C-alpha cells in the first residue's frame, strides 16, 4: 500500500470537468472498502493541513458511491465529453478544458500522477545531502541529454522522436507501470514533450550536441544544488525556482528547450526521483555560488540617472552619437540624422548574465547592445537585441553600451549578474 507518497490533487472530486463510468452495484461495497484507506493522512504526501482537502474529497466519493444511483437517468452524463488539452505556459503541466478553452483544470493523464515519489537520499549534514542529491539529479539530466542526442540521430519523424524520448523518461523517472499501462504512459509523456522538442528536431543532432558544453552542464548541476531542499528533494516552489534559475543562467536555445521540457514531464516528483538514486558523491559543489546573483533596474522615465549613465561617443566617430535625457521621458538622440542614441555605464562586463532594456516604440527601433574596452573605444562586439543572456563567451569590457539606431526613446534598463551588486541593493528579481 502506498504510504505518504501520493500527491493530493488540487481540485474537488466532483468539480467540472467530470467523467462518468458504469459500475456493477455488487462491486460498490468492495470499491468503498478499497478507497477507505485514502481517507487517512498516512496515504498522502504533505502535512495534515496540505492533504486535508484530499481526504475530505475521498470521504465525499465514498458518500456518492453509497447513494447507489441508477445509471438509467444519467444517460446524458455518460455521453462522450469533448476536451481541449494544453501544457500550462507557466508550469508546463498538462491541463484540459471542457468549455472550449475558457477554463483549464489539471489533466489526469499528466505523467506526474503516474509517478510514485521515491524517498530522498539521507546524509549526515545538509550540505552533503544537497550536494549528493544535486549530483544524482545532474547525472540523470545528462542521461537525458545523451538519450536526446541519440534519438535525434535516429528518429525520422517528430512522432518517432517523441516516442523514443518518452520511453527513456519512463526509466529515468522510475515510473513503474503494470503490463498494458506502458503504452498509455508513453503516449501521455509524448504529448507532454511534443511542442518543446520540435525546434530541436528541425535544427538536428549537430546543433543539439554543440549547445550542451561541459560548462552548461555544470551550470545545471549548480542550479540544482542551489534550489533543491535541505532534505535532498524539490518542493513544487523549489522546482519552479530551479527552472527559473536555469532559464536566467543558460543561453536560450532549442536544445535547452528540448531537455527542460523533457525533465519537466513528470514535474517535481520526477525530478525528486532523479535526485534519489545514482552515483551520489561524484559532484563537487564548492564552485556553486548560490547567493551571488544580483539584479538592478533603472527607469529613465522616473530619473535620468545621469550620474551613472552618459552618452556614448566613440573617438572614431563622435559626431553621430549624441544622446541626451529628458526628465520624465528617457534617453533619445539629439541628432536629426543619423539617429544613434546610445548610452554607456562603467562596469566589468564579465559579471553579466543578462541585459534587457525597453525602447519606445520598439517596433520602430533597431536595438544596440555593445561591450566597450573603454569609455570612448569602438565596440568589442555588439548585438542587435534588447534582451540577451550572457554565458561567459563574450569578450570582457570595462563599459556596457545600450541604445538604438533610430528615433525611439530608451526608457529603462535591467542588468542581471553574479558576484556583488556594483550598485548596492537589488531592486528587481
Image (cartoon, rainbow, N blue to C red):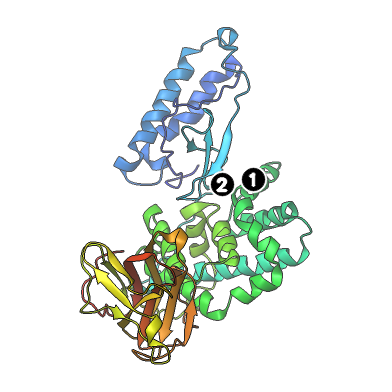
Could you tell me if the residues under marks 1 and 2 are in contact, i.e. CB atoms within 8 Å?
yes
- Secondary element under disc 1, as helix, strand or loop, is helix
Residue 261 in the image, given as x and y percentages of width and height: 56, 57
Mark 2: which secondary structure? helix
Q: CA distance from mark 1 to mark 2?
A: 7 Å
- 114 or 366, which lies in front? 366
Q: Residue at x 44, y 72 (%)?
A: 405
Q: Is residue 196 visible?
A: yes
Give percent across and percent down for residue 157.
76, 55
User: Image height check: is 75 above or below 125?
Assistant: above
Viewer-proximal residue, 421 or 395? 395
Q: Which residue is mark 1?
A: 185
Pointer 1 local density, CA inside 10 Å: few below 14, some 14–19, many at least 20: many
Relative to the observer, which residue lies in front, 416 or 1? 416
Quarter of the rendering containing residue 365: bottom left
Is residue 286 in view?
no
Q: Quadrant of the C terminus?
A: bottom left
Whole-percent x and y of residue 123? 39, 70
**Residue topped by disc 2:** 111
Numbered label attached to residue 54: none
Q: Is residue 341 left or right of residue 199?
A: left
Farthest residue, direction top? 73
Q: Residue visible at 40% across and 32% down?
A: 39
The crowd level at tag 2 (other Cα within 10 Å; few <14, some 14-19, many 20+) is many
Q: Is residue 208 left or right of residue 394?
A: right
| Mark before the other along the chain sequence, 1 or 2 | 2
Counting labels gives: 2
Closer to the camera in the image, 341 or 402 = 341
Amino acid at each position: 500500500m502506498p504510504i505518504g507518497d501520493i500527491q493530493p490533487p488540487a481540485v474537488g472530486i466532483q468539480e467540472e470537468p467530470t467523467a462518468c463510468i458504469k459500475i456493477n452495484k455488487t462491486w460498490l461495497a468492495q470499491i468503498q472498502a478499497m478507497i477507505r484507506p485514502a481517507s487517512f493522512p498516512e496515504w498522502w504526501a504533505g502535512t495534515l493541513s496540505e492533504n486535508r482537502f484530499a481526504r475530505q474529497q475521498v470521504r465525499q466519493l465514498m458518500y456518492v458511491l453509497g447513494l447507489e444511483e441508477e445509471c438509467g437517468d444519467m444517460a446524458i452524463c455518460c455521453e462522450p465529453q469533448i476536451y481541449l488539452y494544453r501544457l500550462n505556459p507557466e508550469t508546463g503541466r498538462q491541463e484540459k478544458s471542457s468549455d472550449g478553452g475558457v477554463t483549464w483544470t489539471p489533466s489526469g493523464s499528466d505523467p506526474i500522477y503516474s509517478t510514485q515519489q521515491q524517498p530522498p537520499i539521507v546524509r549526515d549534514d545538509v550540505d552533503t545531502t544537497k550536494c549528493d542529491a544535486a549530483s544524482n539529479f545532474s547525472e540523470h539530466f545528462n542521461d537525458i541529454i545523451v538519450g536526446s542526442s541519440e534519438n535525434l540521430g535516429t528518429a525520422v519523424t517528430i512522432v518517432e522522436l517523441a516516442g523514443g524520448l518518452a520511453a527513456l523518461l519512463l526509466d529515468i523517472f522510475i515510473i513503474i507501470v503494470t503490463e498494458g499501462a506502458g503504452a498509455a504512459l508513453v503516449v501521455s509523456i509524448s504529448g507532454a514533450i511534443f511542442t518543446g522538442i520540435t525546434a530541436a528536431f528541425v535544427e538536428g543532432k549537430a546543433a543539439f550536441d554543440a549547445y550542451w558544453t561541459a560548462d552548461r552542464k555544470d551550470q545545471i548541476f549548480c542550479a540544482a544544488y542551489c534550489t533543491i531542499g535541505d532534505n535532498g528533494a524539490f518542493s513544487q516552489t523549489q522546482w519552479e525556482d530551479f527552472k527559473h534559475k536555469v532559464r536566467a543562467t543558460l543561453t536560450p536555445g532549442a536544445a535547452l528547450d528540448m531537455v527542460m521540457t523533457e525533465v519537466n514531464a513528470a514535474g517535481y516528483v520526477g525530478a525528486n526521483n532523479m535526485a534519489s538514486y545514482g552515483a551520489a558523491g561524484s559532484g563537487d559543489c564548492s564552485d556553486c555560488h548560490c547567493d551571488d546573483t544580483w539584479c538592478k533596474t533603472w527607469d529613465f522615465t522616473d530619473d535620468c540617472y545621469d550620474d551613472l549613465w552618459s552618452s556614448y561617443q566613440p573617438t572614431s566617430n563622435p559626431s553621430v552619437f549624441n544622446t541626451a535625457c529628458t526628465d520624465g521621458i528617457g534617453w533619445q538622440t539629439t541628432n536629426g540624422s543619423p539617429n544613434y542614441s546610445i548610452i554607456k555605464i562603467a562596469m566589468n562586463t564579465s559579471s553579466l548574465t543578462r541585459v534587457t532594456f525597453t525602447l519606445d516604440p520598439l517596433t520602430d527601433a533597431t536595438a544596440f547592445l555593445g561591450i566597450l574596452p573603454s569609455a570612448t573605444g569602438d565596440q568589442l562586439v555588439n548585438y542587435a537585441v534588447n534582451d540577451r543572456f550572457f554565458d561567459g563567451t563574450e569578450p570582457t569590457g570595462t563599459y556596457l553600451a545600450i541604445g538604438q539606431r533610430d528615433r525611439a526613446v530608451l526608457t529603462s534598463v535591467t542588468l542581471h549578474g553574479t558576484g556583488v551588486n556594483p550598485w548596492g541593493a537589488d531592486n528587481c528579481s
